[in-house]
Amino acid sequence: MEVESRGDNLAKVRKFVAGIAKDCGFDVQVIYDIKVAVGEATANAVEHGSPRGEANRVKIACLCDADTLMITVTDEGVFKRAFPSPEETVNYRGHGILLMLALMDKVTIDESGDGTTVSLTKNFRSNSAKATKTA
Amino acid sequence: MELSVKVEEEIPVLNITGEIDHFVAPKLQRQIDELIDAGHDKLVFDFSEVNYLDSGGIGVLFNAMQQLAPRRGRMAIVCGDPNVIRILELVGLFDKRTNVSLFGRLDKALKTLEGEIDVG
């Protein structure tokens, strides 16, 4: 899916990936985690990866194979890489990255193209492992 | 996101329904700022009807926490959704050193905050 870089499109993107995650067979908790991780990456794309504001676009792609669901969020800017200042660590930017890393199994940030692509991967294995965990 | 505020025994209860993301978070921030500027240092957030929360909302909560800390303020979050709670716990919102507590029921949150005595 491709959307204009606007905050009111965040909900649309979340709904889209939640549908895909559900089709992949993830349980409710994992679907929520994926929604949040993608929500973070997309918010970052809208807020920091769109030098021309609403004229920019954000692309979401989902790739499902036997082992994983990978969702990529691509914007047309440069990922904010500066080390967070002390006050930033308690604002939304620091938490966004923390959440992506905590909620997904693999996170990569690729700035080699014209924009930035954040790839978020969830393993199916960790989903089923949860079900078989015993005390 | 829908937002309304009711003051119960001098403590504002912010009732929020729906999703709190980066797009709607500023609206919540403005409401909180208004309440803090008006002199309130105890806030209750009723998240019973919140079904989505990410760092947009978390940022607002941490901002509020920081503003209230020098005034020994307190914040209570009422929430029963395990997914939302998981995210709030993940970012350490309810750690010992914060002034934020989680409650399952609004009446318990209000009772606790009302009962707390400010020492100095």
Image (cartoon, helix red, strand yellow):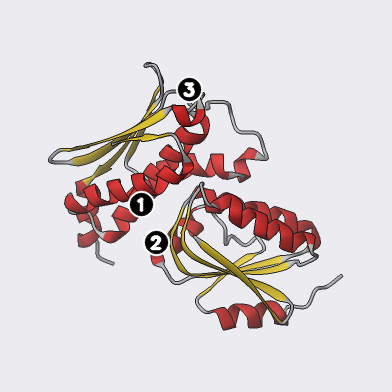
Q: Which residue is mark 2?
A: B83
Look at discs 1 and 3 and give the one toward the viewer: 3
Residue at figure coordinates x 16%, y 41% from the top left: A67
The type of residue carrying mark 1 is: Asp
Residue found at the far right of this picture? B120
User: In the image shown, does A8 or B116 lie closer to the viewer?
Assistant: A8
**Callout 1: chain:** A
Q: Nearer the viewer, residue B7 or B61?
A: B7
Q: Name the amino acid, label 3.
A: Val
- Position of the N terminus of chain A, as image quadrant, is top left
Q: Residue furthest front?
A: A55
Q: Do the residues under discs 2 and 1 have CB atoms within 8 angstroms?
A: yes
Say left or right for A36 vs A65. right
Figure check: B55 above or below A63 = below
- In terms of sequence position, does the residue under pointer 1 or pointer 3 come before the other? 1
Judged left or right of residue A56, residue B29 is right
Residue hosting label 1: A33
Residue B116, image x, y percentages:
73, 78
Residue at 67% over, 59% down = B32
